[in-house]
Image (cartoon, rainbow, N blue to C red):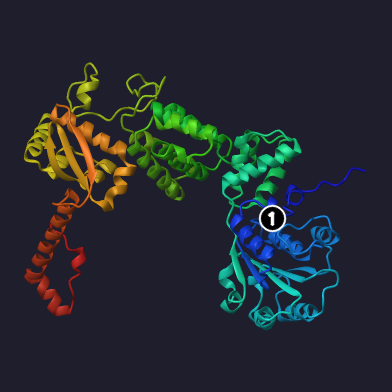
């Protein structure tokens, strides 16, 4: 007769601190206490489901009762260790407070606690979901929790520590268990599948790790389901079908179509998702995450640990402007928020994709990418209409040049050394404008313009080098000559455009308040109805 199957979550449950994953801060503290003999009488483990609260409790019970002695490395082979692992050790009691929450249940447990251990060194009582106890039950255990017998140890576990009375919290050593990051879950699942000799794809494990939401137990349960769904294989396509998740192929197909300005390809992705009944809300969430990773690859590629992912993201990072990635991220998250207001989710998702195309500026060309076109009926995104009345031969260079009057305004302001007017005349927008607003004109020598940022704005310079390069190129084009920008940080001697704009705003606001206060009609209303003027809403029109 074949042996019954054991779930992976039980089979691969850690049996020692060495095999525990992702809770190094707790292991370090407990190991030091066990090895030095500084044993507290009560521990409280908090954290979401499946992060190791009960597992740590069992390992701690073995460490206290191992026949080889109290240490952070129980042998795992003695009778006490094997009995605790198989849940048949008489001096280790796990109590579920969700179903044994009354004062009578607590009184019965405490009555048994006064007796000496039957087989071990310590009696260890583990109370799971302790926040479910009633107030009377907490009161009943307070005295014993504060001064327990020498042979007794309490281990409390909860997913909601806010509901535990402070009188109980003050009597325990509290450890907050972290949620498992997706990377750690993926690594652990990889080791398990390799040990089980089960074929798998890395992309499938990443989907399982994200679906587990920080719980290793949930990840192992989902892995069991994926193995059954894939008939002994863990493949990405089957896992995405099982989870109803949006695969990376859909997301990268959207980015490819967006980079090429190909409307038909982008809508084809939406149609394919609808046929597979995939969640459009989850798709926009995943798209926002991917856009964040692409932006991260532009600014800090070394922060992406996995080499394959980094290479794939860097390939996309070269196809998009840094400012546009910020805008695309906003479109994705706002599109997700607006889905409940759309006629249906497909329409809302499609409109978000069309927004990505509609607000897409001219992007750097990727190798082999086709430029956007709208005149051949191919369905690709059309460029925004220009103000020119003629539509003859396309000319790329004039389209990139600023109007002559705008160039004249830039040159005039530049000659005066007025950085505020220069920034205005350049018609900067978005993140580029924000960066320029915080700069101060220092001097201009030999076609080199020196600008200064305050120390408080140093992060702008460090994180937005590409944006400042954009300012430099726009300024050189407007001046019709090469210009080099040189940035430094230090104390602002004069005033930045942002400061001047704020002063103007405050002055206009003061004028508006003064105008309202002197207006006979407003004064009459105030006197007649004993009203007051809400100055914060005053505006000049």
Tally of numbered discs:
1
Instruction: Name the image quarter holding residue 388.
Output: top left
Could you tell me residue 22's position as x and y percent? 61, 52
* Left or right for 217, reference 444: right
Element class at badge 1: helix
Could you tell me residue 35's position as x and y percent? 68, 63
Q: Nearer the viewer, residue 262 or 289?
A: 289
Q: Nearer the viewer, residue 332 or 189?
A: 189
Q: Nearer the viewer, residue 402 or 314?
A: 314
Instruction: Name the image quarter holding residue 476.
Output: top left
Please name the residue shown 62% across and 73% down the image: 172
* Left or right for 456, reference 108: left
- Name the residue carrying label 1: 17
* Left or right for 263, reference 439: right
Looking at the image, the residue that sits furthest to the top is 393
Q: Is residue 525 visible?
A: yes
């Amino acid at each position: 007769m074949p042996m019954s199957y054991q779930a992976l979550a039980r089979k691969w449950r850690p049996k020692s601190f060495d095999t525990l994953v992702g809770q190094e801060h707790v292991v370090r503290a407990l190991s030091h206490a066990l090895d030095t003999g500084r044993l507290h009488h009560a521990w409280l483990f908090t954290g979401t489901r499946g992060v190791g609260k009960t597992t740590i409790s069992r390992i701690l019970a073995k460490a206290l009762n191992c026949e080889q002695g109290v240490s952070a490395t129980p042998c795992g082979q003695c009778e006490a260790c094997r009995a605790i692992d198989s849940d048949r050790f008489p001096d280790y009691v796990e109590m579920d407070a969700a179903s044994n929450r009354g004062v009578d249940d607590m009184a019965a447990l405490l009555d048994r606690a006064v007796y000496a251990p039957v087989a071990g060194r310590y009696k260890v009582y583990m109370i799971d979901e302790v926040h479910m106890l009633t107030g009377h039950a907490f009161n009943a255990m307070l005295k014993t929790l504060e001064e327990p017998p020498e042979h007794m140890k309490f281990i409390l576990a909860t997913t909601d520590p806010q509901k535990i009375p402070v009188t109980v919290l003050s009597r325990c050593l509290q450890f907050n268990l972290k949620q498992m990051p997706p990377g750690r879950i993926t690594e652990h699942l990889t080791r398990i599948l390799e040990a089980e000799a089960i074929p798998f794809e890395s992309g499938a494990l990443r989907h399982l790790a994200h679906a587990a939401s920080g719980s290793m137990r949930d990840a192992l349960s989902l892995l069991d389901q994926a193995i059954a769904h894939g008939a002994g294989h863990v493949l990405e396509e089957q896992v995405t079908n099982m989870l109803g998740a949006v695969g990376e192929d859909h997301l990268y197909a959207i980015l490819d179509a967006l980079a090429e300005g190909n409307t038909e390809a982008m809508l084809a992705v939406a149609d394919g998702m609808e046929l597979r009944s995939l969640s459009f809300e989850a798709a926009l969430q995943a798209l926002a995450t991917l856009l964040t990773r692409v932006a991260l690859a532009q600014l800090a590629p070394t922060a992406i640990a996995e080499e394959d992912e980094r290479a794939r993201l860097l390939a996309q990072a070269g196809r998009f402007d840094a400012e546009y990635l910020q805008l695309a991220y906003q479109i994705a998250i706002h599109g997700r928020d607006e889905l409940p207001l759309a006629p249906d989710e497909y329409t809302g998702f499609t409109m978000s994709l069309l927004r990505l195309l509609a607000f897409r500026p001219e992007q750097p060309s990727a190798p082999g990418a086709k430029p956007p076109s709208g005149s051949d009926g191919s369905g690709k995104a059309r460029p925004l209409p220009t103000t020119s009345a003629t539509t003859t031969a396309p000319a790329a260079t004039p389209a990139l040049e600023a109007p002559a009057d705008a160039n004249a305004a830039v040159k005039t302001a530049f000659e005066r050394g007025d950085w505020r007017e220069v920034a205005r005349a350049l018609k900067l927008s978005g993140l580029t404008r924000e960066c320029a607003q915080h700069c101060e004109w220092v001097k201009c020598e030999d076609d080199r313009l020196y600008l200064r940022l305050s120390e408080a704005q140093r992060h702008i310079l460090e994180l937005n080098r590409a944006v400042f390069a954009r300012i430099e190129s726009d300024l050189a084009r407007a001046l019709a000559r090469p210009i080099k920008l040189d940035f430094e940080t230090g104390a602002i001697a004069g005033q930045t455009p942002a400061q001047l704009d704020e002063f103007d705003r405050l002055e206009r606001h003061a004028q508006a308040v003064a105008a309202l206060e002197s207006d006979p009609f407003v004064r009459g209303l105030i006197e007649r109805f004993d009203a007051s003027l809400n100055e914060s809403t005053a505006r000049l029109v």
